[in-house]
Image: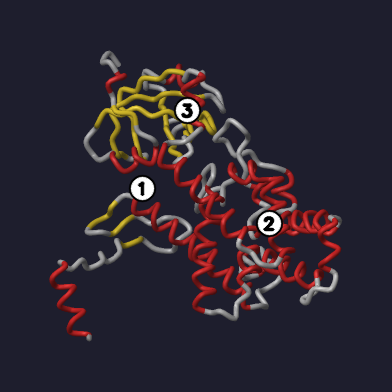
Amino acid sequence: MSEDVSNFEKLNLRQLKQAVGPTPEPFRIHAQIEASAQKPSSAGKPYLELKLNDGTESITWRVFDNNPSFAQAAALRKGEWMELAAHWESGKYGLEPRNPALRVLEMEEVEALLSGDEDTRDQQRLDYETITNFVSEIADPRLRGVCLLFLQLHGDRFKRAAAARDYHHARRGGLVEHVSQMMRSAVKITEAYPALNRDLLVAGVLFHDCGKLWENNYAEGSFTMPYSLHGELIGHISLGLEVVNKLWRQLMDTEEAAAWASFDPANELVRLHLLHLIGSHHGEMQFGSPVLPRTPEAIVLHHVDNIDAKLEMFRRGYETSAELGNGIFERVRPLPTNVVKPLTKLTLPAAEVTATENELE
């Protein structure tokens, strides 16, 4: 590419997916190579498949052997950081860069990319504050104590974790976003159903996916999510039960815990109910829960988790999926169908709102 690519607008991958259409447009991206593989084409010729990730989204770039950048791209390795400047269009293989120009990122550019774009940084900071605020409002000192101990010991790891590997909140910091929104929803439900144990439900939301700190976590200084033996052999639900049991034992060894021996409900009953929320939150045994939800709080947690995951899938569909026609977007897995643009809220002029209110009085 002979033109000066420094003048190309720099976008993150989420913005790129929204901006690119059928007509090529010049953009730059900064990303890490999450995976690199050489494969044979249908004609038997080699091509590269590079998965690029920048913490907001990931894309797959297929580089065929007739591409002038093939040799340069083949020299790049998993974990390396790159700028890819090109005229981007939406083609047969998704986002396709035409006339690409590659270069390896400088260290300060890598550090800036890892810190996230301003909107993501601000959102995740606010989400973490939301979590800590809800935890601080827990009245039961045992549940508040075990939550605070978790945040104290594992807060940094929590901030890096994804809520899933593929389907929802599958990004660095995604678990914090997921847990924060679930807490907001769960607290609202306890206002509508005051018989629910708000303290237990907030703690259950915090811990329901805590095993993903070891199953779906990113290495420090990387957008690559490695596979772990703990995640593969044990899974996040079993890991979560183990984490909470260990934290609970640490909490019960403190001087403060001596005053809780006479509490009703008893310490052991509180622990069992918290473990039940973790163990049952997938809702069905076929989806990995060792036990079905057997308490009101367990049912609420399961559905709040499912609602937030599904709505995130819809959001991603509207932002990144191809529009098939008139507000119909291509299916986002694992949703079973194409997704349709939601009905826009009616916005009335102020005068009409006042008139409607007067009619109701």
Residue 351 versus residue 20: which sits nearer the camera? 351
Q: Residue at x 51, y 26 (%)?
A: 111
How crowded pointer 3 is (Cα within 10 Å; few <14, some 14-19, many 20+) is rated as: few
Marks 1 and 3: which is nearer the front? 3
Classify the position of the C terminus by image quarter: bottom left
Q: Is residue 234 left or right of residue 32?
A: right
Which residue is disc 2 drawn over? 147
What's the amino acid at mark 3? Ala
Instruction: Please state the horizontal and vertical placement of residue 113, each as a whole percent of the image.
Output: 47, 30
Residue sitting farthest toward the top:
2
Residue at mark 3? 112
The residue that appears at 31% across and 19% down in the rendered structure is 6
Total residue callouts: 3
Label 1: which residue? 320
Q: Would residue 36 appear left or right of 279 to someone viewing this image?
A: left
Quick one: 188 or 354, which is closer to the camera?
354
> Which numbered disc, 2 or 1, marks the residue that appears first in the sequence?
2
Q: Position of residue 225 (x, y in %)?
A: 60, 39
Q: Is residue 313 left or right of residue 37?
A: left
Sort mark 2 into few (<14), some (14-19) or many (20+) by Cα contacts within 10 Å: many
Which amino acid type is marked by label 2? Cys
Find the distance from the CA under tag 2 to the CA under tag 3: 31 Å
Q: Residue at x 59, y 42 (%)?
A: 160
> From the viewer's perspective, is residue 174 above or below residue 238?
above
Give the SS element for disc 3.
helix
Q: Which mark is residue 195?
A: none
Q: Amino acid at mark 1?
A: Thr
> Closer to us: mark 2 or mark 3?
2
Quarter holding residue 84:
top left
